[in-house]
Amino acid sequence: MNKFLLWIRALRAPFFQAAAIPVIVGTSIAFYQGKFSSLFLFVLALIANVSLNAAVNLINDYFDRPSDNINPQPTPFSGGSQVIQQGLLPAKAFLKGAIIAYLISLVIGIYLIYRSGPVLLYIILIGFILNYSYTAPPLFLDYHGLGELVVFLCLGPLSVLGAYYVQARILSWEAFLASLPVGLLVGGILYINEFPDYLPDKTAGKNHLIVLLGQEKASRGYIILLVLIYSTILLATGLKAVPYLALLTLLTVPIAIKAGKTALKYYADVQRLIPAMAGTIQLHLFIGLLLSLACIAGRYFSK
């Protein structure tokens, strides 16, 4: 395999939308409020968050080897990249790659703190600690049922508020409210992607929510999660944190219904569950983009 394509696979680059969408949403809210200050700072924030996401993907594969090594049915969305398991790259290459990605994010982060203000330091510091500790020692948060919460916080409130602060140099409750569905969506991606890994993760002692709840009960939890996503959108819209155009995100409800039905019926069937996994990723992308476009358009319509 081409070396470049191999690293694209190792980094799980197609899933960088998880880091890009919250930055786009946070920046769009700043634009909606007339507090957008710099396209350059937006690009830097985007690169920093994507680099941080790349780092955690590599670290995850490095420390998740006990589970990934015994996974009999990896999918395009779960079971890690399988690059280490197939002998395509050594494990130490993942560790080195993660360090480089962390350094890129760190250098950009320092500059953004200098340009924006000290509050960003605390956002970045909390995000970095949670990011690294997701599957790495000494905390191994995902091994103790906290992985979904970590992903929600890092790629929801922290990322959205961080991107907003870079532009506005203040924090706002509007940005926080808009971050909730974004965080829940990324948490939902992780949640549904953990179903196929149930047995190997349970064997390896990785006690995420699917292992703790059991697949059948967890499938009902997925429905609750979908309801919460749309409830937070309605809440943010009702409180005027985002413009009423944000209700266009409700156009994605058919995707959510299909994904929910699939999860309830095929929670223990890896291959038949894949459409629900893909559907959750689509929901994150479409809702994130529609929410951002609503904020951008709302800026002009509000004049």
Image: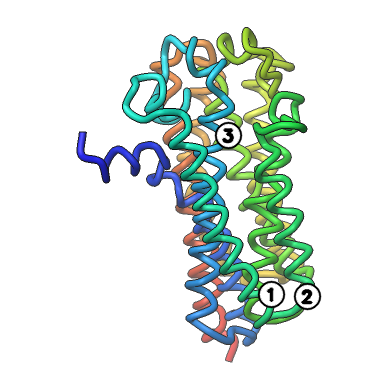
Amino acid type at image mark 3 = Leu
Residue type, mark 2 in image: Pro
C-alpha span from label 1 to label 2: 6 Å
**Where's residue 157, x and y in %?**
71, 57
Question: Could you say whether the residue bearing mark 2 is in a helix, strand or loop?
Answer: loop
Q: Which residue: 66% across, 33% down? A: 136
The image's colouring method is: rainbow
The C terminus lies in quadrant? bottom right
Q: Secondary structure at mark 3?
A: helix
Q: Between label 1 and label 3, give the one nearer the viewer.
A: 1
Q: Whole-Å distance between the Cαs marked 3 and 2?
A: 31 Å
**Front in this rendered view, residue 175 or 39:** 39
Q: Position of residue 25 (x, y in %)?
A: 57, 65
SS category of the residue bearing label 1: helix
The local crowd at label 2, few if under 14, some if 14 to 19, many if 20 or more residues have their Cα within 10 Å, is few
Q: Which mark is in front, 3 or 2?
A: 2
Q: Which residue is mark 2?
A: 118
- N-term-proximal mark, 1 vs 2: 1
Q: Which residue is mark 3?
A: 190
